[in-house]
Amino acid sequence: MSHATDTTGTVYLVGAGPGDPELLTVKARRLLDEAEVVLRDNLVGEAIVESLPDRTAVENVGKRPGGDRTPQAEINDRLVRHARAGRDVVRLKGGDPTLFGRGGEEAEHLAHHGVPFEFVPGVTSAIAGPSAGGIPATHRDHASALAVVTGHEDPTKPDSAIDWESLANIVSAGGTLVVLMGVGRLPDNVSALKSHGVGDETPVAMVERATLDDERTVIGTLDTIVDRARRVGIEPPAVTVVGEVVNVRETVAHCLGSGAAGESGAPGEWSPAASAASPAEEEIEVNQQ
């Protein structure tokens, strides 16, 4: 194992939050202003990237499903290489760096090579996404338990790392399930919950591009959410929320945010009432937060 020297820079594993620059922590903002190098992911809000000082070297190492990607091994090597050159580095990730962000893997690699590092927590989209849509993750009257999972994995594969039966039990018992990165697997994930006993009428919401100007929220049930998400074209990044807490949005939507409520009763929401006229009008209801 290598050991850090006086000339070795520090790597900061920083959470950028859900996208709105105002949701950066004070410490994250300071480190971004001081960093010599920033290695950013694609889920980092563009307004945050654009706010970086001109002198900062910015490297996009983002990964998207089915698209170009920088291998994790190369990202790890770059972090070590920059630090050993005496540079202070920010590894900037959407949300929180340790929640499905590979921050733990990068920390282990840095420690193995004797590079000093620090975690700088960020506002995770698992909480910020639902709340931006008027949905609390927990509520004394609705949910006292919360589970957060990644939605990338195929729930039907025999060696799945996700225990859908246990997740279904949490929801059936009144808890909240938040699925990150699950747009592509939405039908599979819904089927997995149903097959383990979660009722068809269980409330479900999807919040797309939470906290950004073009945020959209779609409300439904376990039985309707796949069709509704498809009809309005929900795309990544989006957070899926399953549980009774989704119903809280109905009671608060008229006072949520600064946008004017549409026919559906809340900015950016698709509902059956909004769909009564035509498919084109359905989409109008979800296009603005």
Image (cartoon, helix red, strand yellow):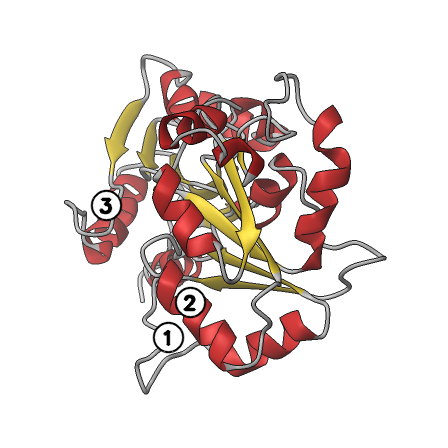
**Which of these two is toward me, 147 or 254?**
254
Residue 30 drawn at (x, y percent)? 54, 25
Asked whether 23 or 108 is in front, the reply is 23
Q: Please report whichever mark, 3 or 1, sits nearer to the chain's N-terminal start.
A: 3
Q: Position of residue 49 (x, y in %)?
A: 37, 23
Q: Is residue 202 above or below residue 129?
A: below
**Is 191 situated left or right of 130 in this image?**
left
- Residue under pointer 2: 189
Mark nearer the viewer, 2 or 3: 2
Mark 3–mark 1 Cα distance, whole angstroms, equals 34 Å
Residue for point 50% across, 74% down: 194
SS state under label 2:
helix
Q: Quick check: marks 2 and 3 in contact, CB under 8 Å?
A: no
User: Which residue is at the far top?
Assistant: 54
Seen at 60% across and 32% down, the residue is 25
Distance between mark 2 and mark 1 Cα atoms:
7 Å
User: Which residue was labeled with disc 3?
Assistant: 78
Q: Residue furthest right?
A: 140
Residue at 25% from the left image edge and 34% from the top image edge: 60
Query: Please, what is the three-letter code of the amino acid marked with disc 2?
Result: Asn
- Badge 3 crowding class, 10 Å Cα cut-off, few under 14, some 14 to 19, many 20 or more, is some
Tag 3: amino acid: Arg
Q: At which x and y percent is residue 266?
A: 63, 29
Residue drawn at (63%, 16%) of the image: 260
Question: Which of label 3 and label 1 is nearer to you?
Answer: 1
Res 79 label: none
Name the secondary structure under disc 1: loop
Residue matched to label 1: 155
Q: Amino acid at mark 1?
A: Pro
Say if residue 198 shows up in the picture. Answer: yes
Q: 221 or 210, which lies in front?
A: 221
